[in-house]
Image (cartoon, rainbow, N blue to C red):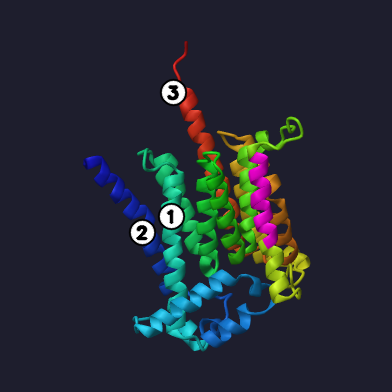
Amino acid sequence: MRTRLLLCTRVLLLGFVIPLILSTIVYQFFSTNLTSGELFSKQGFEGQYENGVYKYRVLGRILLLKTYDLITLYQIPASAPKSILDGHGDPQFYAAYFFMNTIFLCLTSVVLFFIFDGHHRKDFTTVELPLLFLCILMAITQFVVVPYDTLSYFFVALAAQLIIHDNRTSRRTIALGAIVILATLTRESSSLILAFYFAINYRDLLARPANFRLNQKQRALLTIAFCFLCTYVGLRFIFGYEHAVYQRFRLLANMTSQLSVSGAIFFASLAFLLLSTKPSSKEISVFFIAALPYILPIFLAANTGEIRLWTPVIILAVILKVRASRSQMITQQEPVM
């Protein structure tokens, strides 16, 4: 009884209380300099996110508008920083961002708690510490307020949970494929799920097929890759091919802007620390290589100063680092014969 109460308390604090407070601080006490105030109104929002590369990120857009409808229907109290309102923002629409992103920040934190095996372990260094770091990172990187980041983190974390605890059943593969579809409807960072799957299972995936037959891991990767490609291409078929891959080319700006260079250095520094410190794991190196189709376009067509773009990569890399730490602890505890 006492153990169960402690577990519930830890889930409550790490999955709800702390993320909620962090999100409240970010949304109510800080004010963004990178998101136009007009985007905090329904008209401005639709003008932005129904055009360009943003039009393919449909799930977050739909959920945010539904959240706004609920807020206005039930007249839920809403507030916003003064600068948001001065920029022609609607406090209820700003509240829709806050409620939706906070809900999925909490859900992501809960999933990470179970990924880090918090329901079996009372180890601050491999459960609470990495979870608090990722929670703070997800919260503070919302200085660019968008309707799809925390939603995409949730799907990425949920997919990681399924991949780590793979029971090699077709039902699990179907569930993973469904998550990949939903994640791709949210944001292109869903490709990192494929990179994570490859990193976890690279030995089986690189094995030569016996009698020209693919093994279970190879078939599963092809399935989820098919789900990603069909959704990615299907969205462009439905909404058109203008700005199908990127909004504008930004390589020169990323090389000359101090803020963009700082963001790239931040990511490179964390990547170096994850790769160079013990316990080391080949899975982490494989993951960064497999994630290059997501990482390289950020330098070419996105603002590297927006740390939120690096966040899903960091989440998955930290998960791999914690796995390596846990494997080392198990090895050290094995009795010597």
| SS for callout 3 | helix
Looking at the image, is mark 2 or mark 1 earlier in the sequence? 2
Looking at the image, is mark 3 or mark 1 earlier in the sequence? 1
Q: In the image, is 216 to the left or to the right of 82?
A: right
Looking at the image, is mark 2 or mark 3 earlier in the sequence? 2
Q: Are marks 2 and 1 in contact (CB under 8 Å)?
A: yes
Q: How far across and down, in percent of the image, does residue 191 sit? A: 65, 55
- On residue 109, the disc is 1
Within the magenta stretch, is there residue 225? yes
| SS for callout 2 | helix
Mark 3 and mark 1: Cα distance apart in space: 29 Å
Determine which residue is flagged by label 3. Answer: 333
The amino acid marked with disc number 1 is Ser
Q: How far across and down, in percent of the image, does residue 9 sit? A: 28, 50
Residue 319 in view in this figure: yes
Q: Residue at x 76, y 76 (%)?
A: 242
Determine which residue is flagged by label 2. Answer: 16
> Vertical placement of 237 versus 319: above or below?
below
The amino acid marked with disc number 3 is Gln
